[in-house]
Amino acid sequence: MNTSFWKSGHTPTLFAAFLYFDLSFMVWYLLGPLGVQIATDLHLTTQQRGLMVATPILAGAVLRLFMGLLADRLSPKTAGLIGQVIVIGALFSAWRLGVHSYEQALLLGLFLGFAGAAFAVALPLASQWYPPQHQGTAMGIAGAGNSGTVLAALFAPALAAVFGWQNVFGWALIPLLLALLAFALLARNAPDRPPAKTLADYLKALGDRDSWWFMLFYSVTFGGFIGLASALPGYFNDQYGLSPVTAGYYTAACVCAGSLMRPLGGALADRIGGIRSLLVMYGIASLCIATVGFNLPNVNMALALFVLAMLGLGAGNGAVFQLVPQRFRKEIGVMTGLIGMAGGIGGFLLAAGLGAIKQHTGDYQLGLWLFASLGIVAWFGLYGVKQRWRTTWGSAAMTVARV
């Protein structure tokens, strides 16, 4: 990464956006790695477990639209502070009052959605500081906050085994409070922020066909990442009989791969173009997921393919958001909310769908193949718009970035 990048924006804000996003993702994903232990204590079915771990994803998807509007109307920093306080309050209540039923677990998941909505705050906060040629790198670094899923997968099941899963909510408050302090001190709103957007602006953006393409592409890359991250602890436990702690470690390896590749995927897209990078990543992820669908007899073979798939999906996340600011520079707040919402909905459908399919068929095969097929659909869709994008808004006359 060259020195011109670090001089082109505001590094403390970029760090604050990353840290806020990272810890928010940690708690947004918290029910995923705790899913097996919670389901055992609350006597949940596989389908109920799937819906429980998917609820924060759906709530985060819907709330991203709200948080995007709030970031536009107030400021990204103010919206971020509000969201963090709500999440801290919800976790404190769950820790002190306890979660004693399926319905209460779903209610907690709804409040954790505010953590998932951090996406609509952290990315515009960072993006607005950086020029077009560095958007992929800046958005990749800020977006690498999804590495918080690694922290949850690594530590949540082990802490739950020692202290009980209810007390994990209390442990999570410590890093969250530190992140809140750092965000308040370090983050700054960009001086040339675009004017606030209204709900009508969101509806207008939906009238642009490119917005729908980006929502589809991100629903596969990010939806695949967070959906698999939430479902894999249960998958490894159901399919291979791994303990919750071991399943958490296996899941952590997968989500670590995807998280690390997001900033690298953004940097790669800056170098070779977002479209070319995304086409390769869709191919890798779809092939790996389809292969896993054959119910491999060895858990390590499945792990290796899931890691490769997550590498592709993580890099794809970075590539999508290398392209978005080139196409929607003035509408970045609106489009971040809409595209992020689509990604969350994709993740909810994948996590909940895998649980429902396992419940009714006794197997994950159909769900994995359906997701792999969606990746192929996205590949052909991107290939179809490639020429138009490169000769219109992605042309050399319109942007200095590689598209």
Image (tube, helix red, strand yellow):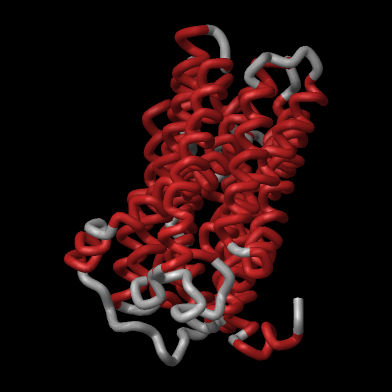
Q: Residue furthest left?
A: 200
- Is residue 108 visible in the rendered image? The answer is no
Give the vertical position of 135 relative to 283 (above or below).
Answer: below
- Residue 261 is left or right of residue 56, and the answer is right
Give the vertical position of 243 relative to 188 (above or below).
Answer: above
User: Residue 205, image x and y in percent?
Assistant: 26, 62
- Residue 15 is left or right of residue 218, and the answer is right
Res 274 quadrant in image: bottom right
Residue at horizontal 72 percent and vertical 29 percent from the top? 247
User: Residue 241, image x and y in percent?
Assistant: 73, 15
Position of the N terminus, as image quadrant, is bottom right
Give the vertical position of 108 relative to 324 (above or below).
Answer: above
- Is residue 138 visible in the rendered image? The answer is yes
Residue at horizontal 55 percent and vertical 22 percent from the top? 369
- Residue 46 is left or right of residue 175, and the answer is left
Query: Viewer-proximal residue, 115 or 181?
Result: 115
Position of the C terminus, as image quadrant, is bottom right
Res 2 quadrant in image: bottom right
Q: Residue furthest top?
A: 361
- Residue 13 is left or right of residue 327, and the answer is right
Residue at horizontal 52 percent and vertical 83 percent from the top? 129
User: Residue 134, image x and y in percent?
Assistant: 60, 77
Number of marks: 0
User: Residue 184, image x and y in percent?
Assistant: 53, 79
Query: Viewer-proximal residue, 221 or 159?
Result: 221
Residue at horizontal 41 percent and vertical 90 percent from the top? 192
